[in-house]
Image (cartoon, rainbow, N blue to C red):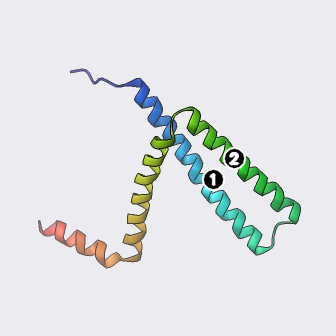
Amino acid sequence: MAIEIDEGNLKQGLLGLVITLVEIIQDALRHQAVRRMEGGSLTEAEMERLGEALIELDSAVAQIKEEMGLVETVKNIRGGLDGVVNELIDDFINPQKLFAAADRERLN
């Protein structure tokens, strides 16, 4: 029995994942930039260059998503990843809930 793979969907999904990872890195860069600005470790010129670079990156990623028809794909991947991250954070913050679920699973 041969497995049929739709090459178009595979490429679309892989490119969507790559763009999603770029967006996540963008978010981290933006967060770090804000921390550095608030911490006073950047000059006025550095803040301006950093802001311009982040805006250019946002524009480039948005253009790629639009041109490649990835807007919905990236949105769906981000939504799934956000759900996983939220669940992990919840488990970390509320370990008793995690242990209770493990106990219920063990008893079944």
**Label for residue 16?**
none
Q: Is residue 59 above or below residue 64?
A: below
Front-lying residue, 67 or 84: 67
**Label for residue 26?**
1
Q: Secondary structure at mark 1?
A: helix
Q: Amino acid at mark 2?
A: Leu
Residue 11: % across, % down: 47, 30
Please rate how many residues cluster around mark 2, counting C-alpha atoms within 10 Å: few if below 14, some from 14 to 19, many from 20.
some
Quadrant in the picture for the C terminus: bottom left
Q: Amino acid at mark 1?
A: Gln
Q: Is residue 93 left or right of residue 55?
A: left
The residue that mark 2 highlights is 57
Please rate how many residues cluster around mark 1, counting C-alpha atoms within 10 Å: few if below 14, some from 14 to 19, many from 20.
some
Residue at 60%, 52% in the rendered image:
25
Give me the C-alpha separation between circle 1 and circle 2: 8 Å
Q: Is residue 4 above or below residue 59?
A: above
Disc 1, disc 2: CB below 8 Å? yes
Residue projecting furthest to the top: 2
